[in-house]
Amino acid sequence: MRAIQVDLPDDAFSALRRDPQEMSEEVRIAAAIQWYSEGIVSQGKAAELAGLTRAKFLDELRRRHVPACQATRKELREEIHG
C-alpha cells in the first residue's frame, strides 16, 4: 500500500478535536465518500479506499446524509424499462 502525506495546520487537530491518527482515518473516509458521491468509484471500491467493510461504509453514508444509491431517476427508469 502506498502512503500520501497531507500537511495540515497545527490548530486543525484541536479545532476538530482529533488526534493525528483519527484525522488520518477521517480524511481517508471523507475522500472515499466524496469520490463515491461524484460517481468516480463504485460503492465497493469506496469502502475499500475508506478502509471499511461495505456495511460500515453504508453506515458512514447514512450518518453523513449521503445517498447510498447514486443512480438518477432517469437511469433507474431506463434500467427498469430497458
Image (cartoon, grey):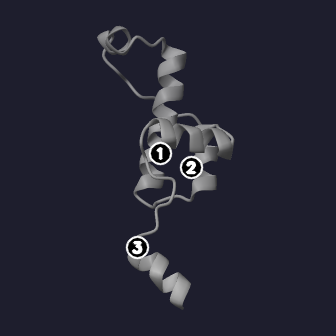
> What is the C-alpha distance between the residues marked 2 and 3?
22 Å
Q: Quadrant of the N terminus?
A: top right
Q: Which mark is residue 33?
A: 1
> What is the C-alpha distance between the residues marked 3 and 1?
21 Å
Residue that label 2 marks: 46
Amino acid carrying label 1: it is Ile
Amino acid carrying label 2: it is Ala
Q: Secondary structure at mark 1?
A: helix
Labelled pair 2, 3 in contact (Cβ < 8 Å): no
Labelled pair 2, 1 in contact (Cβ < 8 Å): yes
Kindly tell me whether residue 53 is visible in this rendering.
Answer: yes
Please provide percent x and percent y for residue 35. 45, 51
Residue that label 3 marks: 73
- The picture quadrant where one finds residue 57 is top right
Of residues 60 and 52, the one drawn nearer to the viewer in this rendering: 60
Of residues 42 and 5, the one drawn nearer to the viewer in this rendering: 42
Using a 10 Å C-alpha cutoff, classify the residue at mark 1 as few (fewer than 14 neighbours), some (14 to 19) or many (20 or more): many
